[in-house]
Amino acid sequence: PNSLLAVAFLASFGSSMLYGYNLAVVNSPAEYIKAFYNQTMVARNRTGLDDKTLTLFYSVTVSVFAIGGMVGSLTVGILVTRFGRKGTLVRITCLVFIAGAFMGFSRTFGSPEMIIVGRFITGVHSGISLSVVPMYLGEIAPKNLRGFLGLVPSIFICLGVFIAQILGLHELLGKEEHWPLFLSLVVIPTMFQLMLLPWFPESPRYLLLEKRNVHATITALKWYRSKVNIQAEIEEMQEEQRSMSSVQTVSVIGLMKDRSVRWQVITIVVVNIGMQLSGIDAIWFYTNTIFENAGIPVPQIQYTTVGTGAIEVIAGCVGCFTIERLGRRPLMIGGFTFMGICCAGITLSLMFQSHYISVACVVGIIAGFCIGPAGVPFLITAELFKQSHRPAAYTVAGCLNWLSNFTIGFVFPFLQMSAGAYCYLVFFGVCTAVAAYVFFIVPETKNKTFVEISQMFAARNGMLEEESSELGVANNPQLAKTNGYGAVSKSVSSSVLI
């Protein structure tokens, strides 16, 4: 339905796209930002910075985004439980406006610190939205469209990277006078989101399972399903509510201790760490160096990089449009395996000085990543957990994601110095291990309800589904039956419902 597509595009456009944009935005104006740092220090202290200090300053500017992301991801559970999924996305838009102002006016006030603070705040926003957008879309989608809608944010992340690469061209905003504007453009998509997203309903699952508001749930479901019969979906939510061992949202510590979700937790740990340690961040960060080594003329490199950005977007679309046909497992196993082969290919090409093969392998790693590993981990984090455990699961997944992201950015240069061409074999090992884990452990979740997915894991967790069901039945108020199109049955007093 159009309303589902509209909310998926709007939530992703104002949140997920900014993550991609902020990943890539600092590459093109790097030299200008360093020059600004140096000029500011000369004006303050009458002496410039040496190369080492300048590099450290710039590294902090790049990596503080990941630190902000980790801080943001730690707050996800609290925010989505208190304000809801849509409510959280609307409230955190203020962070982008503050960050945009800091970065946009940094040169006017002659303050490098403002850029670093701005990057940190955009990181906090991305840390929250990177978890909340897939959670929101996973909960509003019918089971047959959950995979498609769940991968829409990953297309927008790739699109954000691509837009930053295009705007960073010398002909557009890649000039020295434009970099503050280039950094602060993030406010434009967020403005659209702030104007339009409040008009869309909250997640029906949140309204029913956490807020106990049946009337609001039915209104939201009718909005998202238009003329589709919603009775079956209401009953499926009621079944999930009866099987929840607690009506309260589980904390991160509670999630770790709960043996009924042990393998689900291990799965999100493996796929989220694997997603970042697959080497994709190292590739994104060092694309220009690899292209330079391949003999591509320096003025042409920026256009070649834009070409890789276009491949990312195309690969993301391929993943999105095939996930409901192929399923989650093939995209994950295929994506990680292909990335592993390409990582081994880079090592061989560097050993035998075959630079064009290394360029092909870089493109292969990016395409393999965007088809599956870029988006599926966020999607299956929503699918593997029931409502009570989902916010804590996203907190864990998000935190590990950002921590791994920061680690790879920090460690890779040292790994490259000590291991040389062999450093890519580390990524080959990670990709192969994650593909094997998904192949042997993770079941296919395509077209399954959240309760069915939970039951698939029950045997592996060493407990029967009934054990957890029995805990919740007594605590939960009986919910009213609804007729096919969502009107509450007259036989039940509506006062019981809320």
Image (cartoon, rainbow, N blue to C red):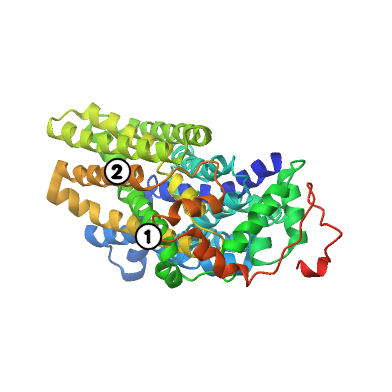
Instruction: Say what amino acid the circle numbered 2 marks.
Output: Ala
Front residue of 143 and 83? 143
- Horizontal relation, residue 8 to residue 260: left or right: right
Residue indicated by mark 2: 436
Q: What element carries label 2?
A: helix
Residue 212: % across, % down: 70, 66
**270 over 211 or under it: above or below:** above
Ranked by sequence position, the earlier of labels 2 and 1 is 1
Q: Name the residue rendered at 40%, 68% in the picture.
A: 256
In depth, the one of 29 and 381 nearer the eye is 381
Residue 351, picture quadrant = top left
Residue 247 found in image quarter: bottom right
For the residue labelled by badge 1, is the local secondary structure a helix, a strand or a loop? helix
Image check: 1 left or right of 270? right
Q: Residue at the far right: name it.
A: 490
- Viewer-side residue, 252 vs 186: 252
Question: In front here: 129 or 289?
Answer: 129
Q: Position of residue 156 (x, y in %)?
A: 52, 43
Mark 1, residues whose alpha carbon is within 10 Å: few (<14), some, or many (≥20)?
Answer: many
